[in-house]
Structure formats: C-alpha cells, structure tokens
Amino acid sequence: MRLTNKTAVVTGGASGFGEAIVKKFLSEGARVVIADINQAATETLSQTLGENTVAAHCDVGNRASVNALKTQSTEAFGPIDIVVNNAGITHLPTPLDEVSEEEFDRVFQVNCKSVYLMAQEFVPDMKARKSGNILNIASTAGVSPRPNLNWYNSSKGWMNTATRTMAVELAPFNIRVNAVNPVAGETPLLASFLGDDTPQMRQQFLSSIPLGRFAVPDDIANASCYLCSDEASMVTGVCMQVDGGRCI
C-alpha cells in the first residue's frame, strides 16, 4: 500500500499504459481521477473500478478542458498529490518533410503543451503545500529516435528535457518530477508506431530489443508506482528507460 492516502490524476487513463497505471495506483491505496478524451471508456472504467475513482472527460491540449479537470479533481478528492502526464499520440511513420502541419500541431499539442497546461493548473497548489509528484510518460523514441517517426520522436525528447528542467526548478518546493521512457508496448498505439502491424514488422522491431519482447502495460505501471511513491523520495529528474535494453 505504497500510495495510501495519496490522490492522483492520470491522463490518458482509460486505456493502454494509463489504464494499467490507474489500476496499479488503486491497488496501492491511492484515489485516482481517470482523465481521458474518450468519455465513454473513462466512465465505464470508473464504474468497474469503484468509488475510489472519478471519471473526467478531458482534452489535455485544451486549456479550458484542463482547467475543468483541475476543478473536478479537487472537488472530488481535495488536494492532488500525483499528476501523471500519460496522454499521448503519434503520427503514422512518414518522411519528416511529408508530415502535415495539422498532424505536427496535434502531436505537440497533446504530447507537449499538455504538460505545460497541467503544470499551470496543478503546480501552484503543490507549491503552496510544499509537496507533490509529477510523472511524465515519454518514450525511448525521445532517447534513440527511429526514422519516419521524426516529430513524435522530437515531442518525446521535449518531454524528457521538460522533466529535468521541471525537477530542478520545483525541487525547492519538495515537488519531484520524473519520467518513464517505455519501449513500444502492447497498447492501441502499437499499430501506429509500426505503420503496418504484421508479424514481419513485429519481428523486425523485436530484434532491436535485447530482452526480446514488447513492453506490457504492467511494466510501465510498476515503474510509475515506484517513482510516485515515497520509496523514491530521493529520486527526481530521472528519465527511466523501461525498454528491455533497447537504448543500450
């Protein structure tokens, strides 16, 4: 019960890595706001998991929506201890000069601007309380970029840099900021990363992972729980690779 009496907000919490993080945090004693743009999935998951969760419809790249998330979260559970910036999207594998401006803007709005908006809403209360924990779910793509995922790679590299600079600035307020860098996992985004989800494409990608498998959501949830728990009270500014050795 490493997160007993803690409250958390998890964006992109209705599926994939986010859903696993929500379930792990609940199992460790936290109360969790499940924030997702898919309202139906969010409400279904919250109803399934019970009274220690709240379903919140949120477009993390929109200021008014993030402001509403902050209001709903604090009304439900009071001060928020943990913010997990998990929501993310990608563009299909495409040469960098062929990605549309609309796709580029959406990737950076969801993957980067959301971190800024969430910080603007939740950090002031954390500063006032001299306590808080922010976790950014980035990607090995931001550490070891793959061709044709160019602007997605860049957005995740931004998240890693943002994590470190947030950690330095917020440390005097006893606010820790870390990131997890997952390798490609068995989530709804996998097909988008691969471009063509075939056995051949899977095997080609797996050949780059020394441990020989994709990440599963529980891998990321377990790492997230550690970084957000008091066991990691001396850990900040870390971008932890959960990648089966891909970035060695």
Image: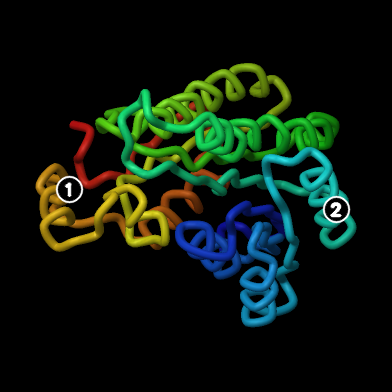
Which of the pair 60/132 is nearer the observer?
60
Which of the pair 166/85 is nearer the observer?
85
Where in the figure is residue 189, as x and y percent of width and height? Answer: 40, 55
The answer to the question of whether label 2 and label 1 lie on touching residues, with beta carbons closer than 8 A, is no
Where in the figure is residue 192, as x and y percent of width and height? Answer: 36, 51
Q: Can residue 102 be seen from the camera position used here?
A: yes
- Which of the two marks, 2 or 1, is nearer to us in this view? 1
* Residue drawn at (14%, 62%) of the image: 199
Q: Which residue is mark 2?
A: 74
Residue type at the position of mark 2:
Thr
Give the secondary structure at mark 1. Answer: helix
Q: With respect to residue 109, does 171 lie above or below?
A: above
* Residue drawn at (58%, 55%) of the image: 12
Where in the figure is residue 178, as x and y percent of width and height? Answer: 52, 34
Question: Which part of the image, by quadrant, shows the N terminus?
Answer: bottom right
Residue 129 falls in image quadrant: top right
The label number, if any, that marks residue 98 in the structure image: none
* Residue drawn at (59%, 44%) of the image: 85
Q: Which residue is mark 1?
A: 205
Where in the figure is residue 172, as x and y percent of width and height? Answer: 69, 20
Question: Which part of the image, by quadrant, shows the C terminus?
Answer: top left
Q: Earlier in the sequence, mark 2 or mark 1?
A: 2
Q: Residues within 10 Å of mark 2 (few under 14, many from 20)?
A: some
Give the secondary structure at mark 2. Answer: helix
Q: Can residue 177 be seen from the camera position used here?
A: no
Which of the pair 82/84 is nearer the observer?
84
Left or right: 236 as drawn, with respect to 191: right
